[in-house]
Amino acid sequence: MAAPLKVEFHFDFGSPNAYLAELVLPEIERRTGVKFDYVPVLLGGLYKATGNMSPFDSLRGIKNKPEYNALETLRFLRRHNITKFKANPFFPVNTLTLMRGAVAAQFEGMFEPYFRAGYHHMWVEPKKMDDPAVFREAFMSSGIQIERLIARAQQDDVKKKLVENTNDAVARGSFGSPTFFVGKEIFFGKDSLRNIEEEIVTQLNGSQRKTA
């Protein structure tokens, strides 16, 4: 019997494109019947390991490209009827604490509410989430037991897991966020969602033929 198809969403809260892409994943899950595994990675670590940089830095000073990038974002928002998104005025935000918190939340069975709150306070009601006081208050306002997760995030197994996730992503070809894997196939960016869904269907159909 073939192993179930593994589909992964690699994210860092600091990526607005990862936030936007994730809003579309439930539609893909509904149509394909496949659930995405959510994998926290550290974007700064990915950039350092690959020599990459954020669009915030790479687009600076380039004529017309930032404007086109903004236009593409508007088109994506319209295409998917996304109304809850604001640019974070404190960007770029150091996301180390946020991402360790995401791993801690996975370990503690608190991931879903933590994940939703993290993205809400980064890209819906944006705040300076690398300020410890702001970080605490934001998650408390969302009903998260944040002191528990802050303490958990300081433990070595959490720190190690985030590093492992990031290093593994680089070894498999990743250089930024959002990155997706459908089996062994890698896809990057929110504009790859159609190709991701097609690949899921292709691999599912291939698996069904093998088991028929």
Image: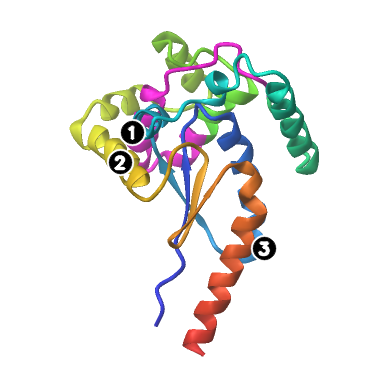
In this view, the mark in front (2 or 1)? 1
Q: Is 111 in front, or is 140?
A: 111
The residue positioned 78% from the left and 40% from the top of the image is 81
The residue positioned 26% from the left and 35% from the top of the image is 158
Q: How is the image coloured?
A: rainbow
Q: Look at the numbered discs 2 and 3 and tell me whether their residues touch, using CB distance below 8 Å.
A: no
The residue positioned 79% from the left and 43% from the top of the image is 79
Q: Position of residue 71 (x, y in %)?
A: 77, 29
Which residue in the protein does label 1 denote?
49
> As shown in the figure, which amino acid type bears the numbered disc 1?
Ala
Q: Is 64 in front, or is 210?
A: 64
Which residue in the protein does label 3 denote?
31
In this view, the mark in front (2 or 3)? 2
> As shown in the figure, which amino acid type bears the numbered disc 2?
Asn
Q: Earlier in the sequence, mark 2 or mark 3?
A: 3
Label 1's element? helix
Which segment did they paint magenta? 86-115
The residue positioned 56% from the left and 20% from the top of the image is 56
Q: Is 183 in front, or is 136?
A: 183
Which residue in the protein does label 2 denote?
167
Q: Look at the numbered discs 2 and 1 and tell me whether their residues touch, using CB distance below 8 Å.
A: yes
Quarter of image, res 55? top right
Q: Earlier in the sequence, mark 3 or mark 1?
A: 3
Q: Is residue 65 visible?
A: yes
Apparent side of residue 64 relative to residue 92 in the rendered image (left or right): right
Apparent side of residue 148 relative to residue 71 in the rendered image (left or right): left
Label 3's element? helix
